[in-house]
Image: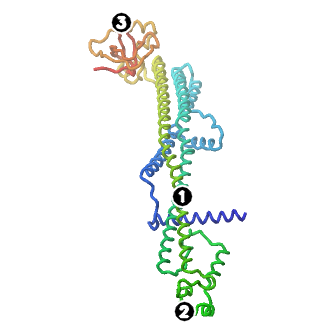
Amino acid sequence: MDFNMKKLASDAGIFFTRAVQFTEEKFGQAEKTELDAHFESLLARADSTKNWTEKILRQTEVLLQPNPSARVEEFLYEKLDRKVPSRVTNGELLAQYMAEAASELGPTTPYGKTLIKVAEAEKRLGAAERDFIHTASINFLTPLRNFLEGDWKTISKERRLLQNRRLDLDASKARLKKAKAAEAKATCEGDTVPDFQETRPRNYILSASASATLEDTCRPPSWAEWKEDYPGGWRRPCIFLVPLNPSLTLARGCLSLPKDRKLWNDEVDKAEQELRVAQTEFDRQAEVTRLLLEGISSTHVNHLRCLHEFVESQTTYYAQCYRHMLDLQKQLGRFPGTFVGTAEPASPPLSSTSPTTTAATMPMGPSVADLAPPGEAALRLEEVAPPASGTRKARVLYDYEAADSSELALLADELITVYSLPGMDPDWLIGERGNKKGKVPVTYLELLS
């Protein structure tokens, strides 16, 4: 326990000394060992990498999970080393509500059928979102967290050690400088007793025995002792009585001038030795820190690979969403408008409404071919003639598989002729390729002038 208390007191003294030295450096009252420009650039790049990695990580978490409460819950589960419970996505929750609404409102009604179709699409979208979140968390978020919680903590620890080694090195330089200045002053004055306390660290304390020995050794002799031993004369300096003859030895074991100078030389040698040790430790720690900082380049390469995987998973997710929505659009195209053929009693009778007003107030329905049975639709499409003006060329952007005989299958990069018919859904056109004719979606085409 006594040893631990001494170590604690010593560590506290060192900490206080370094704090004072650091403060003096900030105010320009102490010299500071500067690092080379390349090392400083490595430090700046490491700090920049750490700051931007934290920002990218936090914003990616917001993108994948917009709910802050859910993010806090996931963070707590992760810190407690427990598995995060499975959470329903927003799309899956919307699909559940739509399915329940269709079941209650009537699954055989046009509105109920549409709710069921949209619920199935939203469920697929929710599953795709779940896969995207899982893939992005493993391939992108996890490497970023590993860097911040692993590599960066190691770099920070070594940088703190380097800072302490630099402070020790600067303290050794200051100690040597003071020792040399005191040695030069003693050489000039000739009889000054060395002040060893000035050349020691601020937390250096002489032991009780050493202090007692120093007091007893350098005790000034009495008047009778001086008169008896040195009748030739004497003079009184600031503290001790020193003989006029420098070669004589002081009474009671006081230090003579040659021995005084020797102690100053020993003190300078000791300070130089401490400086060499501090310089060696500083150089070794600087090399270790430099190697870790140069490893930031490997971190950038790793993060670049993870970024490519994140973009790939995001592209796959949005492609799945696009495909699901196109399928849903095709499915909804086969159903008539919400109120077609199912007019409410409160709606005005057809006889009291002009055909123009009725067409304007009704929602946009599918094409004319969709309102007829499949057999009649195919027959009508064959009988439809292109208008005299208004046909255009279009380039197919993506492959498209026809859902029924009323649609025209497409291949990417082929050129077809397209035109519109009165009453058609604006999202669809009539496409012709040779002798084949059918409906084609506008989103798959690039209209050419």
Residue sitting nearer the eye, 86 or 100 = 86
Q: Secondary structure at mark 3?
A: loop
Q: Tell me if residue 352 can be seen.
A: no
Task: Say which residue label 1 marks.
Answer: 165
Residue sitting nearer the eye, 346 or 134 = 134
Picture coordinates of residue 241, whole percent (x, y): 56, 87
- Which residue occupies 62% across, 41% down? 78
Which of the two marks, 2 or 1, is nearer to us in this view? 2
Task: Say which residue label 3 marks.
Answer: 435
Task: Say which residue label 2 marks.
Answer: 233
Q: Locate the C terminus by quadrant.
A: top left
Which of the two marks, 1 or 3, is nearer to us in this view? 1
Which of the two marks, 3 or 2, is nearer to us in this view? 2
Mark 2–mark 1 distance (CA, rounded to whole Å): 53 Å
Mark 2 and mark 1 lie on one chain; the one further toward the N terminus is: 1
Q: Tell me if residue 103 can be seen.
A: yes
Dot 2, crowdedness within 10 Å: few (<14), some or many (≥20)? few
Q: Amino acid at mark 3?
A: Asn
Compared with 435, 304 (above or below) is below
Picture coordinates of residue 14, whole percent (x, y): 58, 64
Quarter occupied by residue 370: top left
Residue 319 badge: none
Q: Secondary structure at mark 2?
A: loop
Q: Locate the N terminus by quadrant.
A: bottom right
Quarter occupied by residue 7: bottom right
